[in-house]
Structures are given as structure tokens and as C-alpha cells.
Image: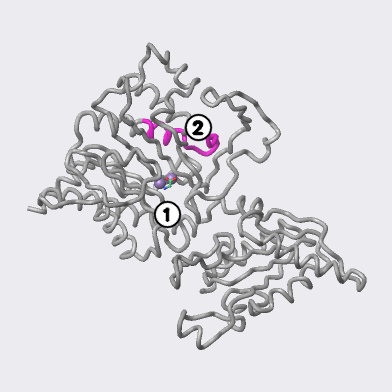
Amino acid sequence: MNESTSTVYVRRRAELARLIGPDGIAIVPTASEKRRNRDSDFLYRHDSYFYYLSGFAEPNAWLVITGEGETILFCQPKDTEREIWDGFRLGPSAAPEQLALNAAFSIAELETRMPALLDGRKTVWYPFATHPGLETQIGGWLSSLRARVRYGALVPEQQGDLCRVLDEMRLFKDSGELATMRRAAAISAGAHVRAMQTSARMLRAGQEVREYHLDAELLHEFRCHGSQAPAYGSIVAAGANACVLHYRADNGLVRSGELVLIDAGCELDGYASDITRTFPANGRFSGPQRALYELVLASQEAAIAVTNSGARFTEPHDATVRVLAQGMLDLGLLDQNKVGTLDDVIEKRAYFQFYMHRTGHWLGMDVHDCGAYLEPGEIGTVHERKDPLSGETIKDRPARILQPGMVLTIEPGLYVRAAQGVPEQFHNIGIRIEDDAVVTAAGCELISRGVPVAVAEVEALMRDAALRAR
Ligand code: GLY
Ligand code: MN
Ligand code: MN
């Protein structure tokens, strides 16, 4: 880690120390390694909070930050034999200089050192409900400290949720984070372009195309550009599979004349991207496909137009719903005689049959990134209402006000399952269009538009690829 890189982590740790106050102590473990089956582990991925504060990606590590700003790492000790099998370990001797910390110890010393580190602190901060067993482990340290009160030990009397503090910090991305996210989105956009082109080219050449062929193209592009892994399980859904919201790339046949929905984004240096495109497998939209696609795109444009600093987080969703609901009436997906006017459709949530998810989420180190969706200063303002579909009582609180540096997705969709009363020409069509937006002072910056969305541009891209196949 060079000087300027470590400065970022030093700054974040100092800010955290300031927020927890001088009588606090923060404890942050990284993620544990996970067994996949027998001797094989899942690809290791560090904990996002831990990495945000340390930039350290090895497993078996804990970070401790005192309210005075002292920073201590527990990490894997150097071990020639283990390093032959598993790879390089930084080790406690090199860690303080390399990571700009005050001290580092072997992870083997965690249990013995933690009670003393907790002694005299008023509040112990750690991420609640994120690491199974963490509460018990910290409880054990507190209890061994309590056993020493006769000798003058002072046991913390409060526990605080570190997620609440770190979520707020992570919600606002700094310029380095935004630069990484722009690069991640650009790589993912290139991967979507590649998948579109491959679909058109293979079908044109008369080859059988399966969902996994397109998944392979995504992975190829991610890895060729330095991404460590997909940020989440890629969805490559051909035809009716697109109506299954959590479908994963499988072996479905990609048929000429059907649409393909791809929701895939790479993770780059700890940051996610999240892009969805829906395109005709052969490069030409049919009339009904195009009608639905244009509607989803119009709803996304409406959402983008209100994604501004000062708007509420819910405004893009509300804008999307209005456009989609009107389109459902216009296209006959909803029968006005049954569901009433546009306002009735929105009020009774009749659109939910075809649009059943929210229009976006925070994006950052985690694909569904942390950060409060409610405006912190207004959580006491509660408005109760009955949900028109479930009858449940819903507590509405004022949504978060968007500010520069926040990053969110804008991802409207339409999913038309075959059902009575639904025009047959739209059956089994699933469409989502998803872009990544950075809130700016002037509006928002879409960082994922390296892959086109306009019908003519998607068709042109795929036509060129298919022609090159000849
Ligand atoms: N890919 C996950 C999502 O779109 O929310
Ligand atoms: Mn998303
Ligand atoms: Mn997505």
C-alpha cells in the first residue's frame, strides 16, 4: 500500500475514532473463510467494513480502534509452511508500517489481549448481527474482564452498533471510491456488450446458444480487465426465465425471437457494479417486445430525471411506477374497467402483478450497499397506513434525501407471466434495465452507460456483430 492509499484508511479510522468518542472502542472482524464442500473453500471475500477501514484483504484478521485513535490489527502470523500452501501473509511485524497502524499482533493473541483493551472503556462498538458468534465472543471478553473487577478492572457498560456509524460513512463515496466504481461499471458495461454481440453472432452462424455461453463471455471480460470476481451471482435469463427475479445463469436455450435478460456486474478492488440489460437474442426486437421495452426505458428516464441532490430516495421509484402503470393501462396489461384510473392503479398497487420490486438500492462495496434509507433527522415522523394488497399496517417514515457522493441503482422492470386476461403477445416477456447513478450537485451521473440502452443502438451493436460473423 503506498502512502496516498494508506492515507485514506488513516483518515477513515480517525473519523471513526472521533465518532465513537474517547471512551469508546471499536472491534471489527473480517469475514471468515467458508467451506464449499470437503476440502474446497468458496473464493475468499473480505468483510466490507473491515476492508473499508484497513484495505487489508487477508482472512483471520481483526481491527481494533480506540476512541483516542489508536489502531491495532490482529492478523495471521508469518508461517513458512502455511505460506507455501496458501500464499503470502503480511504478518504482524510488517503490518504497522505497511498499513499505517499503531500496532499489530498475531491472531493467536486476540483472546488474551482483548479483555485488557476493553478495560476502562465505556462503550464497546462492533457490527451487530453480522458475524455469527461475535456477540458471544465479545461477551466472553467482557465476562473475563468482570472477573477482575476486584483488582480494579472497569467493564464497559454500553454496547453500540458499529454498522450505524460505518454505514453513514460508507454511504458517501469519496473521489477514490468513485473512480474505482466508474472503472468497475465500465468493465461491466463492456461485458454486457460482449454478451450481446456473442448472442447475435452465434445465432447468425447457426450455432446453439445457451445461457452459459453468455455467462462465460461476462466472466471473460470481467477477469480480462482485472476484476477479482462477479459482485453477485450473474443472472442470464433467456425467454420466460427472465420472469424469475432471482434466476441464475443456467443452461437454458437462447432462442432467436426471444429476449435475454442479463443482470451482471463485476467487483473491482472491493467495489461492486450492477447492470441489467435486456436484448433480443438475434438482435431485432419484435413489436410486442419493443413496446414493453420502450415502456421500461421511459420509466427509467423518468426516474433518472428526478435522481437529483435534494430529492427523496423514493422519488425515482414513484416516478417509475407512474410511467409503468400508465403504460400497463395503455397496452392493455391492465384493464381500465377492472382497475380504474392511473391513480387507482397506483393507490391499489395493481401494477404489482407486473412490477414487484423497488427501483433501486445503494451501491458500493456491497451490491446492496449499506446506508440508511430513511432521513436520519426525521425518523420520528411516522405515518401509518394499510397496504392495499396484504392489509398489513405499514409505517412510512420520510425517505433519505439524496446528496452528492451517494451511489444508487435505477432499475425498473416489467415481468409478464402468462395469465388470463393478459394479452398473449406479451406472455413470458421479462424486461429490466438497470444503471448505476452517482448523485451530483447538478443531478446524477450514469456510470454504466458504456453499454447502450436505446432500441436503435442495441440493434445496431448486435447487427454489426452478426455481420462480422459472416
Ligand atoms: N443484481 C442485484 C440487483 O439488481 O439488485
Ligand atoms: Mn440492482
Ligand atoms: Mn442487478
Segment colored magenta:
299-316
In the image, is residue 86 part of the stretch drawn in magenta?
Answer: no
Vertically, is 76 above or below 448? below
Cα–Cα gap, marks 1 and 2: 26 Å
Kindly identify which numbered label has been placed on residue 30.
none
Of residues 44 and 367, the one drawn nearer to the viewer in this rendering: 44
Question: Does the numbered disc 1 mark a residue whose Cβ is under 8 Å from ligand 1?
Answer: yes
The coloring applied to the image is one colour
Name the residue beneath numbered marker 1.
232
Identify which amino acid the numbered label 1 is placed on: Tyr
Could you tell me which secondary element the residue under label 2 belongs to?
Answer: helix
In the image, is residue 310 part of the stretch drawn in magenta?
Answer: yes
Residue at image coords 87%, 71%: 148
Name the residue beneath numbered marker 2.
315
Quadrant of res 428? top left
Identify which amino acid the numbered label 2 is placed on: Glu
Residue at image coords 29%, 62%: 220
Of residues 178 and 204, the one drawn nearer to the viewer in this rendering: 204
Question: Residue 426 vs residue 284: left or right?
Answer: right
Q: Are marks 1 and 2 in contact (CB under 8 Å)?
A: no
Of residues 40 and 61, the one drawn nearer to the viewer in this rendering: 40
Residue at image coords 31%, 23%: 422
Question: Residue 351 vs residue 425: left or right?
Answer: right
Q: Earlier in the sequence, mark 1 or mark 2?
A: 1
